[in-house]
Amino acid sequence: MSKSGSRVADAPGCPPGALLPEPLSATAATEMAVKLKALADPVRLQLLSAIASRAGGEACVCDIAVGVEVSQPTVSHHLKVLRDAGLLTSQRRASWVYYAVVPDALASLAVLLGVADPVGARG
Amino acid sequence: MSKSGSRVADAPGCPPGALLPEPLSATAATEMAVKLKALADPVRLQLLSAIASRAGGEACVCDIAVGVEVSQPTVSHHLKVLRDAGLLTSQRRASWVYYAVVPDALASLAVLLGVADPVGARG
């Protein structure tokens, strides 16, 4: 019946085969675009995924850039962009800064992608 | 234990509290950045969500732009960007073009966001 039928069951409140219950408002779209713009860079995706794959969803800045082929100042710049967009938080502990992903920020984007329940994703 | 603990159970193969089993490769990050860049625009998000919220995850171009405050040529441009990025497909039927979301493309992005099982999202 639908191109999405193979992936997910119809979501409650959605028309049959729809991925979302309703279109985004202009305000919500503007907020999401800021986060997506921050994510839409290969190096930032690698850095974010490096943090997200660590225990607790956080990592020391000294470990994040392992395997990413850019200089430390460039890593710092990209981490700042992700933090400014609300996708990461940072905390200094002794000599090192630790970065953690903000699960709610990622979840709100995932809702747009039609794979997460808007309530469950925040519960 | 973790900042992500309130949102999802630990995923199989992930360290405790991690959102992803492993960092993205440079190749995967580059591919995802292309799709995210296409998504990272408020008007394109509104258009995509308008299509995704229709029955069957598809809509006539004549209906997509309702409520979006841009001209028809601008709508066409943005739909082309989404199609070129592999997020939409289009099909002409009689006088109108119909656009449909590509659920697998959205699901692959959702996996990055740590809310979808990489196998289940495609099954």
Image (cartoon, coloured by chain):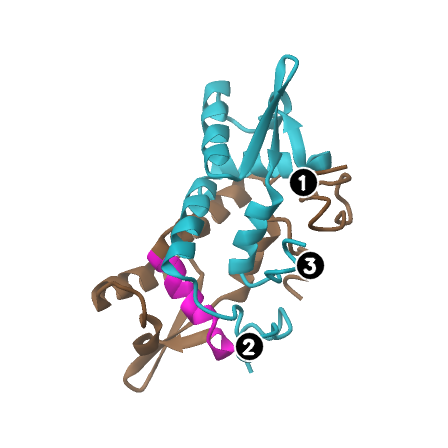
Chain colours: A cyan, B brown
Report x, y in % for residue B45.
Answer: 40, 58
Q: Is residue A21 left or right of residue B70?
A: right
Given residues B75 and A123, the one toward you in this image is A123
- Please, what is the three-letter code of the amino acid marked with disc 2? Gly
Q: Name the front one of labels 3 and 2.
A: 2
Work out whether disc 1 and disc 3 sit on a shared chain: yes
Q: Chain of mark 1?
A: B
Q: Is residue A78 left or right of residue B5?
A: left
Task: Say what secondary structure mark 1 lies in.
Answer: loop
Question: Residue B122, labelled with which disc?
Answer: none
Q: Is residue B47 above or below residue A63?
A: below
Residue B52 shown in magenta: yes
The residue stretch that appears in magenta: B43-57
Callouts 1 and 3 close, C-beta under 8 Å = no
Q: Is residue B22 above or below residue A121?
A: above
Q: For the C terminus of chain A, which image quadrant?
A: bottom right
Can I make out residue B82 in this image? no
Given the current orientation, which residue lies at the most extreme top position?
Answer: A95
- Residue at the (44%, 40%) spot, across then down: A38
Question: Residue B22, labelled with which disc?
Answer: 1
Q: Name the front one of labels 2 and 1.
A: 2
Q: Is residue A6 left or right of residue A28?
A: right
Report x, y in % for residue B70.
Answer: 24, 63
Residue B64 shown in magenta: no
- Residue at the (60%, 24%) spot, across then down: A91
- The residue pinned by badge 2 equals A17
Q: For the N terminus of chain A, which image quadrant?
A: bottom right
Callouts 3 and 2 close, C-beta under 8 Å = no
Work out whether disc 3 and disc 2 sit on a shared chain: no
Q: Earlier in the sequence, mark 1 or mark 3?
A: 1
Q: Chain of mark 2?
A: A
